Image: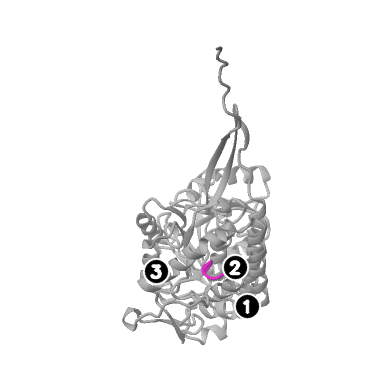
């Protein structure tokens, strides 16, 4: 019997296996096979493999780790079509979205291959009289990674690439509905990085709880706030990195650029709005409110589910989305169309939607809807708009739209968000950090700063010479 990465494992008795997960294509609702639900024996085996691989992997020079990570990036590019097919099977994303995300995955592994060799320079030198000191940045050890279904491969790369570059080994659990692409990444990692360096652990929520309870040295979790709080509680004193979602505001001032509404509609429907940093709450001033409602209605109306973006991922998310829309007190509810080829299927399709004339405590405002939907709120002033933007517990991302550079930069500086944009939204690159505040979690994804997320410092101080002893006379 072989594991997901292709290395041999001990046979598991049938009584130790859970019933497999039935997988469905979110575009059609039809069955597309099954996936294993890992339980205690499989979790223990994966963690043991990662632990066994750790000494060899962390002992490699940054140069050697970088070469292997670069080869893994090459395999991702070489097999891009297969990655795309697996990613689309689990998410229903349009081909253009999937292709772009796979390019980002390869780029991330190449970026961290370089970062592994450069790192950051801590304090070092002659800091104490008679002594030389420096700081070693050492890997934490075995990292348990749990990633969501909205970006199965990309979120795995956000977590795994810096963890591996820093010298850790990784056991990664994909979401129950989207195990496909991470399984292939683990197979390619076994060929390029070595057996056990990156293991895939398919399964459900119980699998995730077993991984958290296992003897991993650190946990990196991306998902809902409720699940993240549970991970943190179970982790004890171990390091935890959490990215727990957002409810991003977009403050649109009356002098916003002409393409503002089109840009917000595109960002709000990318990946069917299933992005933690996607714009969700448009906040504008009285003199611009009706223009914003009309402009966003038109812009969202041109974005068709099935043509411009894919379906919601699973029945649970579909039910949650429908509940939030149904419970909204919005007086205006504008829904766009669904492309005929998508509407004919029995998948998880929902149209782009705008909700307006709703109270500030409406569920569609206070909760993360996580779908192709924008709400529009009215504030009496820019200060009041800022207060509304900062009024929810999530604080991951936000944007400001104005041609007044001074006013825009002032608002950006005072937004409570880990990432903020001015006259754009969802613009990201490997070089720039991404992370949340408040109930959106803590920790850093992307950029060279993410290396330290998976490292711990050790201060080394050396006495340069023994103290001189006094000369004793005879």
Q: Position of residue 286 (x, y in %)?
A: 54, 51
Q: Which mark is residue 95?
A: 1
Q: Position of residue 440 (x, y in %)?
A: 46, 54
**Relative to 304, does residue 279 appear above or below in the rendering?**
above
- In depth, the one of 146 and 268 nearer the eye is 146
Which region is colored magenta?
Answer: 193-198
Of all residues, the one furthest to the left in this rendering is 15
Q: Secondary structure at mark 3?
A: helix
Label the magenta part by its dominant secondary structure: loop
Does residue 147 appear anywhere in the picture? no
Q: Earlier in the sequence, mark 1 or mark 2?
A: 1
Report whether 381 appears left or right of 40: right
The residue identified by callout 3 is: 44
Where in the figure is residue 357, as x and y percent of width and height? 46, 60
> Which of the numbered marks, if any, corresponds to residue 193?
2
Q: For numbered disc 2, what is the local secondary structure?
A: loop
Choose top left, top right, bottom left or bottom right for residue 232.
bottom left
CA gap, disc 1 and disc 2: 29 Å
Residue 7 visible, this orientation? yes
Residue mark closest to the camera, 1 vs 2: 2
């Amino acid at each position: 019997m072989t594991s997901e990465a292709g290395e041999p494992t001990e046979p598991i008795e049938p009584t130790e296996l859970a019933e497999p997960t039935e997988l469905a294509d979110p575009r059609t609702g039809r069955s597309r096979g099954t996936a294993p639900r890992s339980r205690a024996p499989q979790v223990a085996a994966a963690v043991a493999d990662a632990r066994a691989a750790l000494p060899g992997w962390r002992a490699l020079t940054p140069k050697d780790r970088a070469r292997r990570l670069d080869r893994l990036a090459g395999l991702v590019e070489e097999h891009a079509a297969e990655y795309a097919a697996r990613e689309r099977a689990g998410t229903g994303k349009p081909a253009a979205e999937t292709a772009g995300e796979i390019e980002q995955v390869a780029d991330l592994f190449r970026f961290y291959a370089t970062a592994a060799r450069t790192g950051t320079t801590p304090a070092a030198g002659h800091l104490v009289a008679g002594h030389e000191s420096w700081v070693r940045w050492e890997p934490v050890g075995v990292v348990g990674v749990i990633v969501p279904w909205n970006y199965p491969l990309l979120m795995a790369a956000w977590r795994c690439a810096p963890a591996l570059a820093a010298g850790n080994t990784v056991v990664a659990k994909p979401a129950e509905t989207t195990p496909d692409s991470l399984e292939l990444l683990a197979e390619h990692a076994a060929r390029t990085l070595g057996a056990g360096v990156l293991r895939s652990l398919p399964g459900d929520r119980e699998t995730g709880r077993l991984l958290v309870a296992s003897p991993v040295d650190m946990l990196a979790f991306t998902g809902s706030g409720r699940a993240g709080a549970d991970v943190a509680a179970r982790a004890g004193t171990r390091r935890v990195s959490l990215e727990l979602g957002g409810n991003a505001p977009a403050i649109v001032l009356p002098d916003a650029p002409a393409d503002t509404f089109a840009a917000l509609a595109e960002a709000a429907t990318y990946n069917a709005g299933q992005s933690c940093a996607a714009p969700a709450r448009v906040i504008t001033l009285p003199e611009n409110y009706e223009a914003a409602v009309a402009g966003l209605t038109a812009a969202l109306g041109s974005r068709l589910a099935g043509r411009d973006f894919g379906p919601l991922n699973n029945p649970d998310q579909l039910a949650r989305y429908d509940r939030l829309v149904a419970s909204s007190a919005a007086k205006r509810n504008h829904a766009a169309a669904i492309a005929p080829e998508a509407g004919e299927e029995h998948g998880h399709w929902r149209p782009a939607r705008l909700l307006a004339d709703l109270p500030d405590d409406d569920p569609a405002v206070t909760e993360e809807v996580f779908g192709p939907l924008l709400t529009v709120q009215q504030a009496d002033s820019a200060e009041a708009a800022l207060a509304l933007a900062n009024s929810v517990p999530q604080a991951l991302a936000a944007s400001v739209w104005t041609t007044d550079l001074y006013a825009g930069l002032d608002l950006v500086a005072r937004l409570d968000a880990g990432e903020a944009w001015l006259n754009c939204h969802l613009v990201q690159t490997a070089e720039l950090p991404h992370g949340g505040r408040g109930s959106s979690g803590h920790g850093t994804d992307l950029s060279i700063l993410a290396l330290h997320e998976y490292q711990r410092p050790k201060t080394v101080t050396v006495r340069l010479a023994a103290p001189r002893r006094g000369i004793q006379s005879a």
